[in-house]
Image (cartoon, rainbow, N blue to C red):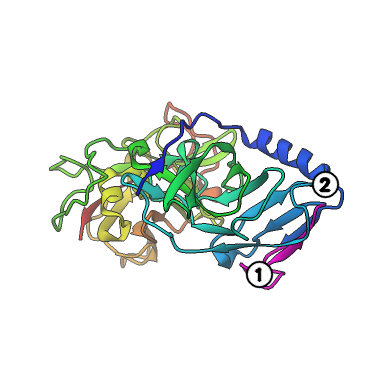
Amino acid sequence: MGCTHLPRNIVRSGVAVWLAILLAVSCFAACKIRDEGEAGGAGSPAVIGPEGGIVEIADPASGISGARVYIPAGALDSEQGISISRKDLPQALPAGYRAGGRCIDFHPDGIRLSKPVLLHLPYDDLNNDGIIDGRAVREENLFVLYYDSLNNRWEELPLYGLDTGDNLAVVESMHFSTYLVAVDTSDARTLDTGFTDTDAEPSFEPGECYLGNDRFCHYYHMTVLRRESGLTAIVDRNLTYVNSGIVAEISEDGSSATFDATSAFAKVLASGDATQWRWEGEFVREHTFLMDYEVMQDDTLSSPDPGETDPGDGAGGIFCRVEAVDANMVKITWEINVFEQVIYQTSPFGTGHCLAIRFRATHL
């Protein structure tokens, strides 16, 4: 088992990729666009002839939505049934390699092509932070493999480009086969740096801190700021005004924000599952300035759930909650609408509005 690893220096911006594709599509004599979902589901063939066309997967439930092939005019000598489907790995990846998306089959395998086709392969970046979910590898470092069934090995194709808006890797190919977006674990860069052995299979003790070599289990912070460009949520070691750290995705109703914990913390990445950790958090009183709320210190007020509570004196209270929603993502919920509470632009001098939360985790 092996894999030929090519230098990854062929990268084009999303604009350049789409320009090239639009030019190619405009040259089709009679372009056919077939949605595999409309053609009877993923794997159902769409008939494409010498005039060329496009076959794509648009069904979000397929797990490979966005996968498509652009076939230029003259690539096929006759009509062919072209299909795209999701499949299991035909063979384990070489040591140090990890999948960055789903394994995708383009059929028919071994078809004769007179011109190269463009294959679009979706990769995992659910929160669009530019980092492959669960891998801590930036999207510009991903690459594409195809499975050589004759020699029973994975081979790498030069990357034609990235569409970072739709999270698609693009390659040019002269053959149909099984393709996979992949990453090299040596490219992993987590936000913290205290634990580096992410390629092993370490074991963690109950109560062990999420940070490496940290016997005090210090907090990390989420800062929600108002900038000229709008509202931003940043996860970093310290409360921050600058764009360092990892960007968290604020929910549409402004009540929470979600970030990729496996890209933030090396131990969580090594464990392979953010739900294996007990998460806790609280507002930072001295750095939270909201329109209608004030953070109060009261040890008699405690609640495992966020939202309005009644401590008994008629004054409502709000608590934040930190929880892993899946193997990669952690959500911090505060219930209030930050779009209505963080109104005035945050400044580095402490004026304006800001929502600050500190959090940490221990292994279950």
Magenta span: 35-50
How busy is the neighbourhood of tag 2: few (under 14 within 10 Å), some, or many (20 plus)?
some
Question: Is disc 2 placed on a helix, strand or loop?
Answer: loop
Residue 60, picture quadrant: bottom right
* Front one among 75 and 201: 75
Specify the amino acid type for callout 2: Phe
| Left or right placement of residue 221 versus residue 139 in this view | left
Residue in the picture at 14% in, 58% down: 206
Residue in the picture at 15% in, 40% down: 213
| Left or right placement of residue 277 versus residue 290 in this view | left
Specify the amino acid type for callout 1: Ser
Q: Position of residue 154 (x, y in %)?
A: 43, 48
Residue in the picture at 26% in, 45% down: 199
* Front one among 86 and 274: 86
| Distance between the alpha carbons at the discs numbered 1 and 2 | 23 Å
The disc placed on residue 44 is: 1
Mark closer to the chain start, 1 or 2: 2
Above or below — where is 107 with respect to 249?
Answer: below
